[in-house]
Image (cartoon, rainbow, N blue to C red):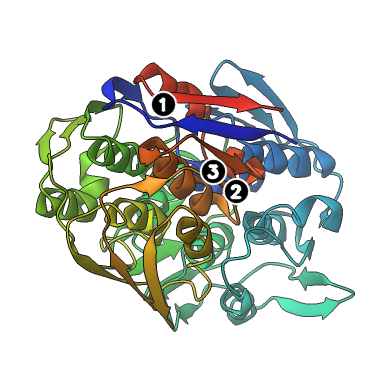
Amino acid sequence: MAKIVIEKSVPLKGAVRISGAKNSALPLMAASLLSGERSVLHNVPRLRDVDTMKEIMEEIGAKIKREGDSFLIDTGNIHSIEAPYELVRKMRASILLLGPLLARCGRARISLPGGCAIGERPINLHLNALSSMGAEISLENGYINARAKRLKGAEIFFDIPTVTGTENTMMAACLAEGKTIIKNAAKEPEIADLADMLREMGADIEGDGTDKITIYGVKELRGAEHRIIPDRIEAGTFMIASVMTRGEVEIRECIPEHLGALIEKLEKVGAEIRVKKDSIFVKGPDVIKSVDIKTMPFPGFPTDLQAQFMAMMCIADGCSVIKETIFENRFMHVGELRRMGADIEVNGSQAIVKGKKHLLAAPVMATDLRASACLVLAGLVAEGGRTEVHRIYHLDRGYEMMENKFASLGAKIWRES
């Protein structure tokens, strides 16, 4: 099984291009099922999760061809409404097929999903929303069975903002009869990216980017050509790496407005940040100051950058408090950081990090996608030998050729079998 090997790096220098957003690519691929016409997606990242979604969609009849960084998606001959366990267990985002299949085909059978072990992430919010729109839903033998002759518009309130729940409901509502209002909707940039593609397909959507989204159902949608937004989490990971190594890195082809919360925190730790229209220059300080963070839904500090930020606080001057409010099991990387000499105390959903001058190289095991990135960043600054990050299939789910991008910035990092 492959591993990533890292030696302590010199300050990172240069420029890095950010790939398309995984968390946009997956719902956009699912959205193509709403039409029987061909759709084209550009800026598609080469990721394990994208490959899994492609495999599932091909299993139900879609034809998907990659040309460079583009996907040509033909959904004219969908012959199955079932997403099987063998594929769905690899990735929780497979649940995004439920809304489009139900809306277009009148039926859907989706295995209960798997994915990273970072919390329960219940799908009851998805199911309650579709039930409110007239779907008959049952659970049997580990599968969700949904049926509706045609969904009806409804007013839906989410107890907590849910990104995939909002996306599933939006997609289903596009072909529903009448008006659907989603209250307490998620406001992440990936929601707006999905809404943009759906509008290109002929959907009538208002309010994306706010907590109230209104969708007026139409009888049919057409194919669309759409460019996926840059991955804000990948951009944030390289920004933090630049600070940790006291480097000077230009993050290219990103959207700075999507990273406001991180930019504010990095300026507080002492980094120099220069923002342009589609790039961010980050220069790390000589001394990294300790800063507290609390993860929140967008536009707050993203939970997907919490682990990476914690790695930085491990070598900061002082003590920081990191509070996780999104997922209950998202401190699984703490044990591995302790193996590298980090001083971290966890109390429920809160971690207290006492910064040290340096971390120590060690073999470590990735437990989930963002924990993998956290350990790579820790390895970049760890002294005393080589850090080996095992189980990097997690990393490949969400980062496109991470080791190559870091190596281009001067890092001593490579992949071994």
The answer for how far apart the CA atoms under marks 3 and 2 are is 17 Å
Q: Which residue is rendered at x = 17% and y = 37% of the image? A: 284
As drawn, 4 above or below 104: above
Identify which amino acid the numbered label 3 is placed on: Leu
Residue 184 at x, y percent in the picture:
36, 76
Which is more N-terminal, label 1 or label 3? 3
Which is more foreground, mark 3 or mark 1? 1
Residue 213, visible in the rendered structure: yes
Residue 395 at x, y percent in the picture:
57, 42
Residue found farthest to the right: 141
The answer for how far apart the CA atoms under marks 3 and 1 are is 28 Å
Residue 202, visible in the rendered structure: no
Circle on res. 406 = 1
Which is more foreground, mark 2 or mark 1? 1
Q: Name which quarter of the figure residue 257 lies in.
A: top left
| Callout 2 secondary element | loop
Which is more foreground, mark 3 or mark 2? 3
The answer for how far apart the CA atoms under marks 2 and 1 are is 45 Å
Which is more N-terminal, label 1 or label 2? 2
| Callout 3 secondary element | helix
According to the image, label 2 marks what residue?
A: 220
According to the image, label 3 marks what residue?
A: 28
Which is more N-terminal, label 2 or label 3? 3
Residue 48 at x, y percent in the picture:
65, 38
Identify which amino acid the numbered label 1 is placed on: Phe
Residue found farthest to the front: 384
Q: Which residue is rendered at x = 43% and y = 62% of the image? A: 215
Q: Nearer the viewer, residue 351 or 294?
A: 351
